[in-house]
Image (spheres, rainbow, N blue to C red):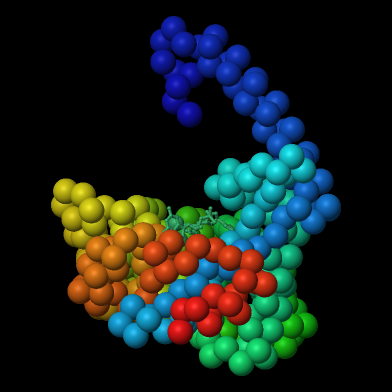
Amino acid sequence: RTKGFQRGSYTLFTREMGVEIRERSLLMQHLHKAFDAERLYLMYQPQIELSTRKVVGFEALLRWRTDEGKMISPTEFIPLAEHSGLIISLGAWVLRTSCFTMRQLLDDGYQLDRMGVNVSAIQFRQADFMQLVSNALRDSGLEPHYLELEITESVTMNGAADFEETLDKLKSIGVQIAIDDFGTGFSSLSYLDKLPVDRLKIDRAFVNQIDHQGGPRIAELITQLGKKLGLKVIAEGIETQAHYEALQAMHCDEGQGFLIARPMLESAIASWMTEWK
Ligand code: C2E
Ligand code: MG
Ligand code: MG
Ligand code: MG
């Protein structure tokens, strides 16, 4: 926040901040209550192989509907949950629930490769994170390779030594790792080359750019980088046929987005799968 340093705007800045802090703490209280009252739930968005249109997996995405029926975006409440520490128990719940859902989908006979679960930097840095993951896998009966943890570049940057240790341990039990929103952070390429990562996720900002001036350049660069590093590449935010075709033309492996399907409740997966086939 550099706004407060602008000359003449200082008073305005502090007053705005006061309101913002009050609103935030109110929202935080609501969030804690919502978790207790089970107003938080997961939706699942399909991921497909672009060349064959085969469904390869799902990404679990958290949702919050307030008592008044208002939807609050995870981009708004995840930072709050991180700030208050709620992300620890919330994240643990997300992990467990996603593993159980995936186990159920496999038991129902769907041939899928993975369930993607978003993990925040704070969660990842917890000393017992590894234990949390193995417990979720053990309790749900899900084989580790079916779980893919999505971490952002910020996780890779400030974790240093113990971050690599956790990553190595996860890899050693077979859990898959994806770098989410790739290209929006600042990971060093030499570092990335050393990390035991399976997949790069092209941020939807770059998929969206396909329609604009400069076109698919960044998406294509990321795809080529991924190939060079021997990683799979998945694009998020595919909204149009033009996005799909452009990504396919650059040999991006997989994708997800509204063109294919919006995130859905677990109960809606079966009929969507039938329809998709
Ligand atoms: P993300 O992991 O990059 O997830 C992709 C976001 O793009 C999701 O937003 C998804 O609904 C949205 N999306 C997918 N396809 C399209 C499309 O075609 N067009 C558009 N416009 N959007 C699309 P969502 O669900 O609002 O989540 C936002 C972010 O919140 C996620 O970004 C992730 O960073 C975070 N998040 C969500 N659930 C969790 C969670 O359980 N734990 C943590 N730590 N973070 C979460
Ligand atoms: Mg994600
Ligand atoms: Mg993403
Ligand atoms: Mg994203």
The one nearer the camera, 262 or 101, is 262
Determine whether 207 is above or below 146 in the image: above
Please give left or right for residue 58 compared with residue 41 in the image.
Answer: left
> Is 124 or 274 nearer to us in this picture?
274
Given the current orientation, which residue lies at the most extreme left position? 214
Q: Residue at x 74, y 33 (%)?
A: 26
- Whole-percent x, y for residue 63 in the image: 64, 55
Q: Quadrant of ligand 3?
A: bottom left
Residue 214 pos. (x, y %): 16, 52
Q: Where residue 104 sits in the image (x, y, percent)?
A: 69, 84
Q: Name the spot of residue 28 as percent of width and height, x first.
A: 73, 39
Q: Is residue 101 above or below residue 32?
A: below
Name the residue rendered at 42%, 77% in the picture.
48
The quadrant holding residue 20 is top right
Inspect this view and state whether residue 116 appears. yes
Q: Residue at left 36%, top 67%?
A: 235
The residue at the point 62 percent across, 44 percent down is 72
Residue 32 visible? The answer is no
User: Residue 255: which quarter of the image?
Assistant: bottom left
